[in-house]
Amino acid sequence: MPALTWDDPQAIALALLEKFPGLDPLTVRFTDLHRWVTELADFRDDAFASNEGKLEAIQMAWYEEYQE
């Protein structure tokens, strides 16, 4: 699997769905989401390079996957 970065919301969403099956992403605080993303085994980006927009994109992609 290629390294994940903040610009890969869909791939991050799939990794989070696999790691936290059954968890509704809309109940996750951005502080927790940020930590969980940076703790993913394949994540290789600067932890401080995220922003609210990037976290929201990940959360929405995760929610779309969660609904399926």
Image (tube, grey):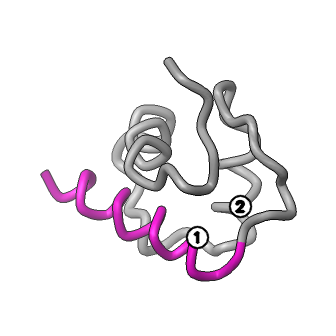
Chain part drawn in magenta: 51-68
Q: Does 57 sit left or right of 47 as displayed? A: left
Q: Does 23 sit left or right of 65 as displayed? A: right
Q: Which residue is mark 1?
A: 55
Q: Residues within 10 Å of mark 1 (few under 14, many from 20)?
A: some
Q: Which residue is mark 2?
A: 34
The answer to whether marks 2 and 1 mark residues whose Cβ atoms lie closer than 8 Å is yes
Could you say whether the residue bearing mark 1 is in a helix, strand or loop?
helix
Q: Residues within 10 Å of mark 2 (few under 14, many from 20)?
A: many
Q: Position of residue 50 (x, y in %)?
A: 73, 67
Where residue 48 sits, quadrant-wise, is bottom right
Q: Residue furthest bottom?
A: 52
Question: Looking at numbered disc 1 in the image, what kind of residue is underneath it?
Answer: Leu
The verdict on residue 16 being magenta is no
Q: Position of residue 14 (x, y in %)?
A: 38, 40
Q: Residue at x 76, y 45 (%)?
A: 45
Could you say whether the residue bearing mark 2 is in a helix, strand or loop?
helix
Q: Residue furthest left?
A: 68
Q: Position of residue 56 (x, y in %)?
A: 50, 76
Question: Looking at numbered disc 2 in the image, what kind of residue is underneath it?
Answer: His
Q: Position of residue 9 (x, y in %)?
A: 46, 55
54 and 65: which is toward the camera: 54
The verdict on residue 62 being magenta is yes
Distance (Cα) linking label 2 and label 1 = 7 Å
Q: Does 23 sit left or right of 32 as displayed? A: left
Q: Residue at x 55, y 69 (%)?
A: 28
Q: Main secondary structure of the magenta part?
A: helix
Q: Residue at x 41, y 33 (%)?
A: 18
Q: In the rendered view, would you say 25 is above or below 37?
A: below
Between discs 2 and 1, the one toward the N terminus: 2
